[in-house]
Image (cartoon, grey):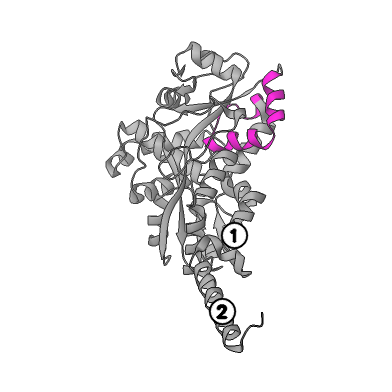
């Protein structure tokens, strides 16, 4: 049957209206931005522990769905919010590893348009099975009801301050005085967070200016005894794995780092578990501190990145492939079988970090 010109014209108009409406619907849905064929390239600085996450092909693909290409460069969390040499490169966003960095960024003159914690991971201590066996004999390490290892960090710090040997702590396979190593607190967040935890443990509560005056020297001694301190959490973790029991007997890191390493190659983890060599072990300090990962939006175009990172898809990828907990510190997906039982469902002993003024004064003391 022939179609009249009027009917044909009405059909074209209807199709045009539907197409325009569809375009507007897609345009206004951030998760469909990539369907329009235009991607925004965002440059920013990130903590090294998130490098593998943003390089993950599944994560890259999900970000493309939001119309985003991310040009991220690794920098220490403290550096990225304080160093003008980095801030002068006009990043669209900063993604440090502690919520206190938002306050420090403001004090550094950063014009923040938006900020939100998008990931969480507790600060932990990585060591090796022979160390755990010895510390369990002396009561510094215990096993929780759910099978994780818990560290009495204050008792360990007291032993380090006293110059106690590894052998007196039950670890006969190691020579010399007991030590624990973190990253440089003036450059990297895991060292920064550990410094706040150390000071608060000596003070017996969340450290204040009075606590810094009274116990700052003790914290300074702990860090001085570490020797060289890596500028990056990722580099320190790599040194730990490469150095083994003798090279790095005990380091400070993030919970997600071992998880990410296991999930990247589960067969490698099974080989490690079945071998006769010293095995990596994660210890949960009691109490610990949470490393919250806030996205700091400097250019409003990075608001779309915040939408993407808090989406269910990217939150699930962050947990199931990289071990990052969600904004509330809980799991955001089903854990891989390779890490079943490795992580506690919740961290029940968390100490807040001292406020920004105390932490900045502590950094100055540790740098002296």
Question: Which residue occupies the extreme left position in the image?
Answer: 210
Asked which secondary structure carries label 1, the reply is helix
- The residue located at (47%, 28%) in the rendering is 344
- Dot 2 or dot 1, earlier in sequence: 2
- The residue located at (68%, 31%) in the rendering is 266
Residue 318 pos. (x, y %): 55, 44
Q: Which residue is mark 1?
A: 65
Residue 242 pos. (x, y %): 69, 33
Q: Nearer the viewer, residue 298 or 77?
A: 298
Q: Nearer the viewer, residue 349 or 230?
A: 349
Residue 28 pos. (x, y %): 48, 68
- The residue located at (48%, 58%) in the rendering is 307
Residue range of the region highlighted in magenta in the rendering: 245-274
**Could one spot residue 166 in this view of the protein?**
no
Marks 2 and 1 sit apart, C-alpha to C-alpha, by 25 Å
Binning the other alpha carbons within 10 Å of mark 2 as few (below 14), some (14 to 19) or many (20 upward) gives few
Report whether 251 appears left or right of 300.
right
The disc at residue 16 is 2
Q: Nearer the viewer, residue 335 or 118?
A: 335
Note whether 206 is above or below 14 in the view shown.
above
- The residue located at (63%, 16%) in the rendering is 173
Q: Nearer the viewer, residue 273 or 28?
A: 28
Q: Nearer the viewer, mark 2 or mark 1?
A: 2
Q: Quadrant of the N terminus?
A: bottom right
């Amino acid at each position: 049957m022939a179609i009249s010109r009027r009917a044909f014209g009405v059909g074209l108009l209807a199709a045009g209206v539907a197409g325009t409406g569809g375009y507007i619907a897609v345009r206004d849905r951030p998760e469909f931005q990539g369907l329009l064929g235009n991607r925004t390239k965002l440059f920013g600085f990130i903590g090294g522990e998130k490098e593998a996450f943003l390089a993950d092909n599944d994560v890259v693909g999900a970000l493309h769905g939001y119309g985003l290409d991310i040009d991220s460069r690794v920098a220490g969390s403290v550096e990225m919010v304080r160093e003008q040499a980095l801030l002068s490169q006009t990043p669209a966003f900063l993604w440090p590893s502690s919520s206190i960095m938002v306050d420090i960024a403001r004090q550094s003159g950063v014009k923040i348009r938006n900020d939100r914690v998008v990931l969480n991971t507790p600060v932990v201590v990585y060591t090796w099975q022979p160390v755990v066996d010895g510390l369990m004999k002396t009561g510094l390490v215990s096993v929780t009801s759910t099978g994780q290892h818990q560290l009495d960090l204050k008792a360990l710090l007291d032993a380090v301050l006293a110059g106690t040997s590894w052998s007196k702590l039950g670890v006969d396979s190691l020579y010399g005085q007991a030590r624990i190593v973190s990253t440089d607190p003036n450059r990297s967040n895991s060292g920064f967070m550990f410094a706040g935890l150390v000071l608060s443990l000596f003070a017996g509560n969340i450290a204040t200016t009075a606590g810094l005056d009274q116990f700052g020297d003790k914290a300074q001694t702990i860090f001085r005894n570490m020797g060289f301190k890596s500028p990056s959490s990722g580099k320190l973790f790599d040194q730990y794995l490469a150095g083994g029991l003798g090279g790095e007997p005990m380091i400070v890191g993030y919970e997600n780092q071992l998880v990410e390493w296991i999930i990247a190659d589960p067969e490698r983890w099974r080989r490690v578990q079945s071998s006769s060599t010293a095995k990596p072990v994660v210890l949960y300090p009691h109490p610990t501190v949470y490393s919250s990962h806030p996205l700091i939006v400097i250019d409003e175009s990075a608001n779309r990145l915040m939408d993407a990172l808090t989406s269910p898809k990217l939150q699930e990828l962050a947990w199931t492939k990289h071990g990052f907990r969600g904004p509330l510190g809980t799991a955001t997906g089903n854990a891989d079988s390779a890490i079943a039982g490795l992580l506690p469902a919740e961290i029940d002993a968390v100490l807040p970090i001292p406020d920004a003024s105390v932490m900045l004064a502590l950094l100055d003391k540790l740098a002296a």
